[in-house]
Amino acid sequence: MQAFRYSQPKSIDNAVEANGRQNSKFIAGGTTLVDLMKLNVEKPTALVDVNGLPLDRIEPSSDGGLKIGALVRNSDLAWNSNVKQRYSVLSEALLAGASPQLRNMATTGGNLLQRTRCYYFRDTNYQCNKREPGSGCAAIDGFHRIHAVLGGSEHCIATHPSDMAVAMMALEATVHLRGAQGERSVALNDFYLVPGTTPEKENVLEPGELITYVTLPPLPQGTRSHYLKLRDRASYEFALASAAIVVQVSGGKIQHARVAMGGVGTKPWRSKEAEQALQGREANEHTFRAAAEAALKPAKPLRDNAFKVELAKRAIVRALQVTTQTA
Amino acid sequence: MSSSVIGAAVSRVDGKLKVTGAACYAVDHPIENLAYGVGVPSIIANGRITCIDSSEAEKMPGVITVLHHGNADPLFRPANAFEQNSRAGESRPPFEDDTVYYYGQFVALVVANTFEQAQEAAARVKVDYAESKPLVHVGDVPAPTGSPARHYMRGDADGTFKTAPVQVDVTYTTPAETHNPMEMHGTIAVWNGDKVTLYETTQGVVNHQHVMSEMVGVPLEDVHVISPFCGSGFGGKLFPWPHSMLAAMAARRVKRPVKVSVPRTMMFTTVGHRPFTQQRVHLGATQDGKLISLQHDVLTPSSIIDDYAENCTEPTPLLYSCPNVTAQQHLVHLNIGTPTPMRGPGTTPGLFALESAMDELAIKLNLDPLEVRIRNYAETDESTNKAFSSKHLREVYQKGADRFGWSKRNPKIGSMRDGNLILGWGMASCTWPAGRSAAEVRVRLNADGTARASSATQDIGTGTYTVFAQVVSEKTGIPVNKIDVVLGDSSLPPGPMSGGSTGNASVLPAIAKAAETVVDTLMEIAVKTENSPFHNADPKTLKMAAGRIHAQDQSPESGVPFGDLLKMRRLAGIDGQAKTAPDESSRKLSSHTFGAQFCEVTWDPGIARLRVSRWLTVMDAGRIINHKTARNQILGGVVMGIGMGLFEETIYDSRNGKPLNNNFADYIVSTNADIPELDCIFVEYPDLNLNEYGARGVGEIGLTGVASALTMAVYHATGIRVRNLPIRIEQLLV
């Protein structure tokens, strides 16, 4: 680990100012950053500890939705009664991730910025365009069972590891940012970038910009949601494929559906194609399978991860079944 | 107490130390003036070091020295005579030359004042290599054509197979697995003049002492190995690995104690692993299910440095009755570290193949898999033509079947259900050799009413401390909590390795005899001490019970506490010491532990989700000395077996030999959520051929048979036969 400066600003303005320097990073729970610093993958020269900032509350938002402070811990968010009742997909996604100890540390903002578990990104002896732009991708010719089938490029096929962000995609969350230039808001779907030729750039954050809140819009009456995570073991593991579904059915027809996937994309993956395939259709097996096929149509599987295509389809179908079955 | 303490479910005497964190593990020992050694691992698997530039590292704060093959003091090769208690994990001493044999080999060691300084400097050591293409997988080398590493034959298996009415010819593979005990390997080396003390985590303090004497090049009596606790080893800590020699060499060089702790990543490269196995099994049988031919051909890789053959065919010649058997093993050599025994070595992957093939045979015959096993029951050990000392496997099968409800099994694939889930039932046999070695133990009775038992063996988490206390308690009536057990120190009377499930059977007779010896001495004191109430009595009329010497025809309460007798004679304490070894006559019989696994899986085909929902293990393991720790060993074995069946695989990068999943996030093992409630029962028939208690070991057998029971259950549920472990979701996603 490289030596670094460390500061604990008490206000958001001071934090943004402190992080204005090159190679400095915000630190909250530290569950990804410290790990990567030990591996010399992240080498910040300064850490700005934001844990003292007043961003740790979950509040109703003016539009009837929810406003989640960037420092709200994953455990607190998962067990929040409002979240459990109204946004169960989010609670389920959070509790499907990591371990209780990690969830007690990890924050909402930090979770959105989780780095990939790609073996080659985490080892500085390998070529990795994400870690060292232009050096090459060791995953494409290597063992890539855990890698992405959606959103990859010849430069990078690393998956985004978050469960929480997948649920937030389906909930159409908005990310609120504060930077030297002031405040701005970005839809979560636009917050993340696919790797293309610049896999080092994973999101639209400008240097020094801080995530302050995430807001969730209110859901239409009668909406149901579910997160289904498929993985090799039953707990404490990243997804091979997951599905977050937010759906409203009326008179047997799908009035409103949001479909997002984890474990298969280079970013938390929302499938407009699947949503279109569901919109206005009968809530039945045939429709669900058609939506799943549409969601995975753009997939570009490789030798070791080809199974993820079918697995992701099954996750979508099952999650739709669960959310549309009549009690 | 004396009659019930053996066999009772006695809690671990060291339990409180462990749960409170007070147990001092190897690298926990507080040592003054300690320096820290951090290794630089190679990042190639095959080649030569052309240059090591440590100039930048040496200028870093706190760095004392950077050692490598160009400047290190010589270390030596071990004699590698296992019988003589000297076997190293890797026979090449570290830094012997500039050759790199595997990824993650130590190529340099940075020694600094703090761990952080050493680690930071290690990252700045620049190593240049001349790299050759590494041999990483068995497919990278031609199939071996020479004579096999092991070969067994009886009858004409090949000829009989060709004309057998029913034939099975299948190939199975099991992946490389990494032991991954919670406590990582580590050594603190402290020199005092020409003598070195090593704080270790080892399954054999005596072997460790011998190997270090040879490899560091100092007389045996100048090496002192201390390992009071071991955060498990699973075989990985049977033999010393390079970091231990490096700590000793570095400490001598810098004239300070040096600690070398092996990081988790290097736990995957330089301290052994269970190698990949490829196993072809031919079974020939009659139409009524009687085996007439059995062939088991095994290919396993070892390192370039050593010949380690995973002994997969160990159970093959004896588990079933069959007139024609061949079993052979071939070795290839790859650019990976030297493999080493891992819990149930050989037999565990071997039984996966053999027991899976038996299930495939049962399906061909349309017979119940349990019935096929009973039709081929081995009444004697046909590999040696010896009688079994104690075998009750038929009863094990029956008890297991009854308890599990096996008769309700509908063999039709996918026919059994629990709601929307499909159920699969599987079973398999377990076996493991029951061995015993020499052991020496000292038992001391103290005037303050306490006792002490000691031996240079060790408790690797299995309950050895507790068993020592139980036996001394049984022989003296002193309560377990007044008996101090001291293990894990090479200066004590030499005890056995904790390996091969032999520890228990080995130490029991020695503890008993040492306790009897010290009691005899106490009797002598009782009759020869003037103010003793037994002065001038015949010692044969006396007895020791409840911690007291008393007349045999009277109650223990009438007697005198042993501490009082010692005080009368102004003795601080008295010792009894005994050495025991298996006698030749015991070799006339074949001693094996047997058992059976029964399991249920649930299968959700819609999302390809497999879960283990029920497990029953029935063991024929002789007399159980401690039901709590024995059960714990069996359940732990099953948990590890479920991991072997469903999760574990060390994945090596073909390009550079790196274990890609070299951490606990990517190398997955069972979590609590993967494990159902586990049921375990014992049929208890003392195996008196092995020792006077009739106890066999239970450390390893719980793992055997688990993976084959699982793949059988998976086949029953899904119709998919998984022949290549682990069972992966993509194999089931059809």
Image (cartoon, grey):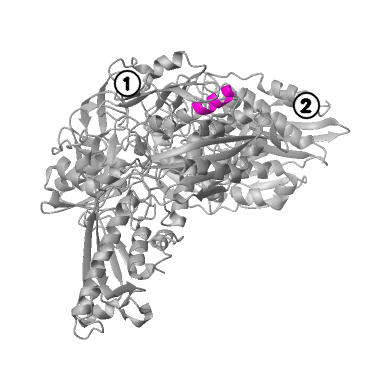
User: What subunit carries mark 2?
Assistant: A
> Where does the image place residue B437, in percent across and percent down from the top left?
27, 47
Which amino acid lies under the numbered mark 2 shown in the image of this protein? Glu
Residue at which label 2 appears: A285
User: What subunit carries mark 1?
Assistant: B
Comparing B515 with A248, the one in front is B515
Looking at the rendering, which quadrant does residue B561 occupy?
bottom left
> Where does the image place residue B48, in percent across and percent down from the top left?
23, 24
- Position of B395 compared to B96: left or right? right
Question: Magenta: predominant secondary structure element?
Answer: helix
Indicate yes or no whether the magenta region holds residue A118: no
Q: State the CA–CA distance, disc 1 to disc 2.
A: 50 Å
Residue A100 shows in the view: yes
Above or below, comparing residue A217 to residue B44 in the picture: below
Helix, strand or loop at mark 2 = helix
**Image quarter (top left, top right, bottom left or bottom right) of the C terminus of chain A:** top right
Residue B23 shows in the view: no
- Position of A39 compared to A186: left or right? left
Residue at which label 1 appears: B134
* Discs 1 and 2 carry the same chain letter: no
Helix, strand or loop at mark 1 = loop
